[in-house]
Amino acid sequence: MNSSNLPTVSVVVIAYNDAGLVGEAVSSALAQGPVVTEVIAVNDASSDGTARVLDELAAVHPRLKVVHRTENSGGCGTPRNDGIAAASGRYVLFLDSDDILPPGAADALVRTAEEHRAPVTVGAAVRRELPLHHDVPWMPGLHTPGEVIERPVDRPELVRDTLCVNKLYARAFLQEHGLRFPDGRFIYEDFVFTARVLAAAPRIAVTGDLVYVWHVRRSAAQVSISLDRKDVGNWRSRIEAHRTAARILAEASPVLGSACRVKFLEYDLRMYLRELGRDPEYQAAWWTLTREYVDTFPEADIEAAAAHARWIVSLLRATVTPPADVERLTRLAAEPPRLLPPYATGPTGAPVWSEELPVELVGLSGLPVGELPVTVDAEPAGRAAVRIRVHDLYGRLAEAGPVTAQLSFVPRAGGAPVLAQPVELHPDSGGGWGAVLPFRLADLAVTGRRQGLRRMQAWNVGVGVRCADGSSVFTSLRPQGRLLRRRALPSSRYGVLLAQPYRTGAGALALRLAPGAEGALYLVRNRLDRARAARGAD
């Protein structure tokens, strides 16, 4: 069956004040070929040139139909609902005005849907960080290409994929179950729509093809709703959306409802906690909101969450205000989690959060070594090495017997890590272990180029610790001292190699590497652009 014989798709594009980007989104939908019978662009009463851009495109492309709303809805749900109502294709696909569909996306989704007679088909999506074009896979490992899930209850972890845009929906399925988005100003409307879809118990087919590119513009004058976290209202909206989704899922299946609440503890809660910031007023409001919501969770759901999430819940319950060491708590919420020293014990010798807040870290003694929230510090040791210190964790790491440490450079855009040579660890006087780990930035730059990273490369820097008992643990590095200084290094291959170590939002070491004069200039300009954007936001 060729593309011209496939059942047709209606692509619904929603837009509000996005005149500069909506044309690219619409063009990417039209470029899908004959499988897309129509592109329905819903202009949510924009006040810029969005209406003009869409009308001009529609005059050239007969497949483009434009719906102009006369009143702004305040959210994304209502215009998507308008698009569903206007659709005539056998399938419906959603697209936001600042994102794109990669070539062949609609074709791949429809072929998979038809092969497996699936009302819902899901494909791969990436978050593309602009302007650097770093692609970060969305929910990697959640879906297996070629898989067919007969009922969502058979795979409760599907509740973690809350996007609506990486999926193809049979329009008859949406009509039969009355599936629509929340109307009006409802933030995180995807949560509720996806819950309604899963509650309707469709067969779900999976294609391994990339079907959606989600553009992330953190330096934009107006960031997307999901990135606009400057006040506690965003978190309140996320909680309310999650509460609604969990209720819908629980009514359809207690298993799905429980999975949704566990997902909140392991994902949403940790994501926002690690970005809590230093504003005491925001922290206090966030803490109160979170405590009140988590208090509604059944104990069984809290016990089903990972140990690090359970400890966070215990701390929330233990104090009505954020603890003095709240920044330490944000590091526990990072990925991978890190429990920073000091390590206190309670009256019975059990590990506790701190002497000031003696909340027991229940379950730490039974965690596999690979899941221990180990902390490793790093400081400079010359121009081409770092000196690390591996902290023990209540004797658990000592039991395993650390033997070697190995630096790992992981592309932030996704891809295979670059591993340095393992180095032997030596016990130190403080009860931990130390080593000097050399690295070759020139070799790293060459590998980055081979992986398609051109002008600027971004790497997360981590370390793997191998133990005598055969176990191992991988974690990020906590930069210390003068490790974050930018350096311009001579290079026989590139002339100059600019290295800019930096601390991520989660307090971990990362590295920007720009090979050659062009790359170095690009890195400097990018840094200036970020600085200007930050000043503008202030």
Image (tube, rainbow, N blue to C red):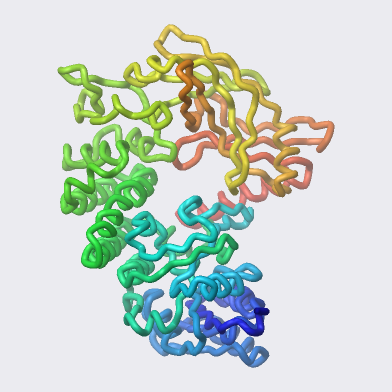
Image quadrant holding the C terminus, namely: bottom left
Q: Is residue 188 visible?
A: no
User: Depth check: 60 or 321 in front?
Assistant: 60
Residue 85 screen position, x and y as percent: 41, 88
Q: Quadrant of residue 232?
A: bottom left
Q: Residue at x 56, y 68 (%)?
A: 99
Q: Residue at x 25, y 25 (%)?
A: 354
Q: Position of residue 127 (x, y in %)?
A: 54, 57
Q: Residue at x 39, y 46 (%)?
A: 275
Quadrant of the rendered image containing residue 71: bottom left
Quadrant occupied by the N terminus: bottom right
**In this rendering, position of residue 93 left or right of residue 340:** right
In the image, 86 versus 529, the foreground residue is 86
Q: Is residue 82 visible?
A: yes
- Where residue 167 appears, x then y in whole percent? 48, 69
The image position of residue 59, as x and y in percent, is: 64, 92
Above or below 298: residue 510: above
